[in-house]
Structure formats: C-alpha cells, structure tokens
Image (cartoon, rainbow, N blue to C red):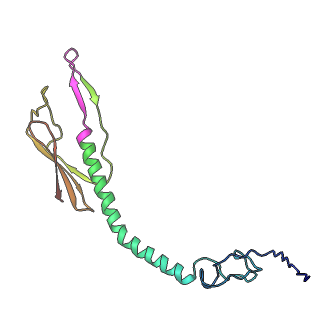
Amino acid sequence: MHSQKTKVVFSRHKVFPFVCLSLPFVCQSNPRNVPLVSSNKPFVGSWGFTLIEMIITITIAGILMAVAAPNMFTFVASNRLASQVNDLINGWLVYYVDPITAANVTLKLHGQLTGNNTLTAPAPVLTFNKSGFLTSAAGNFTLCDGKLKKSRILNIPVTGRPALTENTC
C-alpha cells in the first residue's frame, strides 16, 4: 500500500478570488502582508487635494463670487424697497375723533421708515370718511432708492384702495 501524505496549510492571509489590485476581476489575487488601509510609506496612496487643485478651486469660487455679488446687492436693495412700501401701505396713523370729548383717539401708529430711501407725498395728511373713501384728492406716494435707481409708486385713489407700480427715479 502506498501512503499518501496530506498537506494542510494554515495561512494568515485571506485570499479573495477574482480580485487583483492592478486589474480587478481579471488576474489571480495575491495575498498581501500589508493591509490596504495603511502603508509604511508616508503620503503614498493618501487622499487629499494638491496645491494646484486648491488654487484652482479658490479661483473658481472667487470668480463665482465676483459675478454673484452685484446681483446680491440688487436683490437686497429691491427687497428693502418692497418692504418699505409694504410698511407704508400697512403703517398708518389711524385715529378717530371722540364725539363726547372731541379728542383724537389713536388706534394705530407706525414709526418712521428706515433706510436711505426718499419718500415724496402729495400731502402730509390723508383723511378718509367713515365709508373708507378719501375726503381729499387722490395722491401718489413715491418711494425712491437712489442707489438702485428704482422707485415704487403707491397710488391712493378716491376709493381708498392702494395700488403699486414700479418706475425709475
């Protein structure tokens, strides 16, 4: 009888079939002593940005900011103008005359408009009757932004219902 020796090999390396570092799914895998995550050689296979990539990224970001900054100024100034016109529409000094004491009783009071915009009005006071109609002539309030060169015109007709239009200063 012929005796056959059985060889048992215990390896500490894991072999993954069909995986290779240079050509995946093509060549036979070779066990490696060094894990793929770390290496004895510093900066080999490390991920990050090079100086050239960082300079190019910062340059592109600077160009985009230079294009967006003037549009941002226009957007903010336009919103400020619209907000002030809305404050003008909603912010009136509303009072009534008490028939017994003949004194003015304040119902609503709005403060001064903020910002550097200029407001021109046809009259310092608009008076409405009990039906909500103007007792004086109709008028246009113009709020102008000098930097933006835009204005919003608040037209208050005799009916008392305000209407907004846009114009240039």
Question: Does residue 3 belong to the magenta stretch?
Answer: no
Give the residues drawn in magenta, as a range: 89-103
Question: Total label count?
Answer: 0
Direction from residue 6 to residue 29 in the image, left or right: left
Q: Quadrant of the C terminus?
A: bottom left
Please give the name of the residue rendered at 31% of the width and 58% of the height, measured from the top-left corner: 77
Q: Predominant secondary structure in magenta?
A: loop
Which residue in the rendered view is the most extreme toward the front?
1
Direction from residue 160 to residue 119 in the image, left or right: right
Residue 25 x, y percent position in the rendering: 59, 80
Residue 2 x, y percent position in the rendering: 90, 83
Direction from residue 125 to residue 48 in the image, left or right: right
Which residue in the rendered view is the most extreme toward the top?
100
Q: Is residue 102 above or below residue 162?
A: above
Question: Does residue 102 belong to the magenta stretch?
Answer: yes
- The quadrant where residue 72 appears: bottom left
Please give the name of the residue rendered at 86% of the width and 79% of the height, measured from the top-left corner: 7
- The quadrant where residue 149 appears: bottom left
Tell which of 114 and 72 is nearer to you: 72
